[in-house]
Image: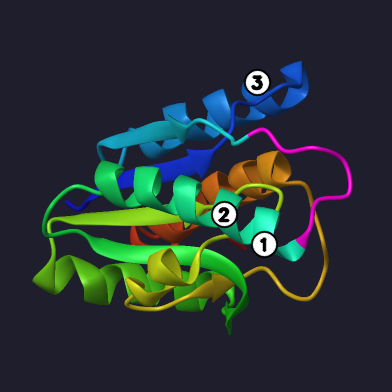
């Protein structure tokens, strides 16, 4: 059984997102140990410059890297990542579990992830070209992790 960590920038602000994430965390726990680590989101003024955004990404990135457990397989979520089907995500997790005891998914903040964090990725994952709030991306990720375990375990959840 592979341990799963989800590192996210920021806290969940909306009750419906907290409830949804809590439900998927409960479901995933039937298959794996899972924990969520929330990294503080940098405050930045309205209409920041490119330099200010880069600085935010660097500071958040350092905190993310410090939170990654040693020896983990890292999968950052980023727009330039690979778009995988649920079945492909399940297969990737199975492959990863052969060589690693833990996998870390990373969800960035409003401005994404630093290049340094992205460079740690064994694979980079994308949910497509759509834009969604990072808090919603966390819930979608948790659902896909649950679905991946359901697929691997021949559960009825994935049809």
Q: Earlier in the sequence, mark 3 or mark 1?
A: 3
Residue highlighted by disc 1 = 51
Residue 45 on the magenta segment:
yes
> Which region shows up in magenta?
43-49
Residue highlighted by disc 2 = 55
> In the image shown, does 159 or 84 lie closer to the viewer?
84
Q: Quadrant of residue 92?
A: bottom left
Q: Earlier in the sequence, mark 2 or mark 3?
A: 3
> In the image shown, does 76 or 62 lie closer to the viewer?
62
Please tell me whether residue 131 is drawn above or below residue 99 in the rendered image. above
Residue highlighted by disc 3 = 19
Is mark 1 in CB contact (under 8 Å) with mark 2? yes
x 50%, y 41%: residue = 8
> Residue 120 location in percent, x, y?
32, 71
Q: Main secondary structure of the magenta part?
A: loop
x 60%, y 61%: residue = 54
Q: CA distance from mark 2 to mark 3?
A: 32 Å
x 57%, y 47%: residue = 143
Q: CA distance from mark 3 to mark 1?
A: 36 Å
């Amino acid at each position: 059984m592979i341990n799963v960590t989800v590192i996210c920038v920021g806290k969940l602000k909306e009750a419906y997102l907290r409830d949804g994430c809590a439900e998927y965390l409960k479901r995933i726990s039937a298959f794996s140990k899972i924990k969520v680590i929330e990294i503080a989101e940098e405050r930045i003024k309205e209409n920041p410059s490119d330099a200010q955004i880069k600085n935010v990404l660097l500071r958040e990135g350092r905190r993310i890297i410090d939170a990654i457990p040693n020896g983990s397989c890292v999968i950052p979520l980023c727009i330039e990542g690979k778009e995988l089907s649920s079945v492909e995500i399940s297969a990737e997790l199975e492959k990863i579990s052969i060589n690693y005891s833990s996998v870390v998914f990373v969800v960035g903040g409003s401005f994404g992830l630093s290049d340094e964090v992205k460079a740690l990725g064994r694979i980079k994952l994308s949910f497509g070209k759509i834009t969604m709030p990072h808090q919603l991306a966390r819930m979608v990720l948790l659902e896909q992790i649950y679905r991946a375990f359901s697929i691997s375990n021949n559960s009825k959840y994935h049809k």
